[in-house]
Amino acid sequence: MNNSAPPGVPVVDVDPYSDAFLADPYPAHRQLRDAGPVVWIPKYGVYAAARHETVRAVFADHGTFISSAGVGLANFNKEEPFRPRSVILEADPPDHTRARAVLARILSPKAMMQMRETFQQEADALLDRFVEKAASAGTVDAVADLAEPYPLKVFPDAVGLEGAGRENLLLYGDMIFNSFGPRNERLAKSAERVKPVTEWIMNHCQRAQLRPGGFGDQIYQAADAGEITQAEAPMLVRSFLSAGVDTTINGLGNALLCLAREPEQYEKLRADLSLARSAFEESLRFESTVQTFFRTTSRATELEGAQLPVDSKIVCFLAAANRDERQWQEPDRFDITRRAAGHMAFGSGIHGCVGQVVARLEGELILSGLAKRVKRLEIAGEATRRPNNTLRALGSLPLRLVPA
Ligand code: OVV
């Protein structure tokens, strides 16, 4: 690691993986944005982009800022990836293009319209239980009782996972998102916890474990058709299992937290349920589930006046871009009526989240179904965070519900 600051690039001496940073990242995000469009973080020897315009520019130039050297801190040109690289996340065109086309078709808006009815029924059933539990027990945990069980039901069902053990996906997701950061204690602990379930995960990427017609099986059909190789098929199922659960759980959890903290905003949603989608979008902007992703330079390049050598790592602060006052009016205000489109929570460009239509569907159905049933969300205890190197994750969110 080269930790000396390159000439002309402002140094910001923060540790984005410290407990303090993760507990409240926003002051440090401001510091990173204000120091310059491209800054240097000495502790990890990496460049950083935290302004909206810069993050967008990095994601737009996927030929210069590549993904195949890893989208976390580790540089795969210098160290072996800890697991075989993702054939979509950690790939560049043309390999990436083929894999992306397959997943984009499986998760197309049209495919989502066909899933909608099922996702709606599951949301309604779960929300009924959620409200009943609040009535009988007095309080509920919006994480354990709602944000977690919903994605854990609908997404593995859609992928076609059958039988027991899907809660293993929680440990796996936590570890994967820790692995994009440094090899710290946080990663070591989650890697230890995931050990007993790794075999289950890999086994459930196999065709025999996947219900015919589900998202997983559709990947194998694409391999049969020659669009991707047979070896890539289980790897793409692995991508679904890595990226499809922990992300939406915390996206929902953060949205519920935002609405519980801002009763006026919740009132607005109750008055107009068609705001559910924009409420979810605004909560993604306001508390971005995925905080950071890296790119690596494939050549020496200039970025907003900074000279970056070949094979440099640059960390893009999606969450900081989403509160950049150069882009947003009153960025620190949670406002479900704002146009949050253009936020970076799903990234942008060719690697922009391929599952965003699924995430949005889940967000819409849970928020509108909740607002239909519950008049007021009352915070019944302190929400806790579950620190992760990449995710803005919740541990618990105790609520009392005033029924409608
Ligand atoms: C977007 C994302 C996160 C984590 C894992 C993967 C993708 C993957 O492709 O494995």
Image (cartoon, helix red, strand yellow):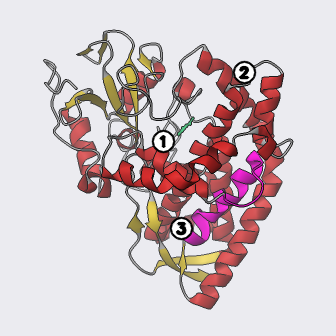
Q: Residue at x 66, y 62 (%)?
A: 150
Residue 52 on image: x %, y %: 38, 33
* Residues marked 1 and 3 touching at CB (< 8 Å): no
Mark 3 lies on residue: 143
**Magenta stretch: dominant secondary structure:** helix
Judging depth in this view, the residue of 169 and 51 nearest the camera is 169
For the residue labelled by badge 1, is the local secondary structure a helix, a strand or a loop? loop
* Gap between marks 1 and 2 measured at Cα: 28 Å
User: Is residue 124 visible in the rendered structure shown here?
Assistant: yes
Looking at the picture, which amino acid does disc 2 mark? Ile
Residue at the right extreme, as displayed: 212
Mark 2 lies on residue: 228
Residue 21 on image: x %, y %: 26, 52
158 in magenta = yes
For the residue labelled by badge 3, is the local secondary structure a helix, a strand or a loop? helix
Q: Give the crowd class for mark 1: few <14, some 14-19, many >=20 residues within 10 Å.
A: many
User: Is residue 287 visible in the rendered structure shown here?
Assistant: no
Q: Earlier in the sequence, mark 1 or mark 3?
A: 3
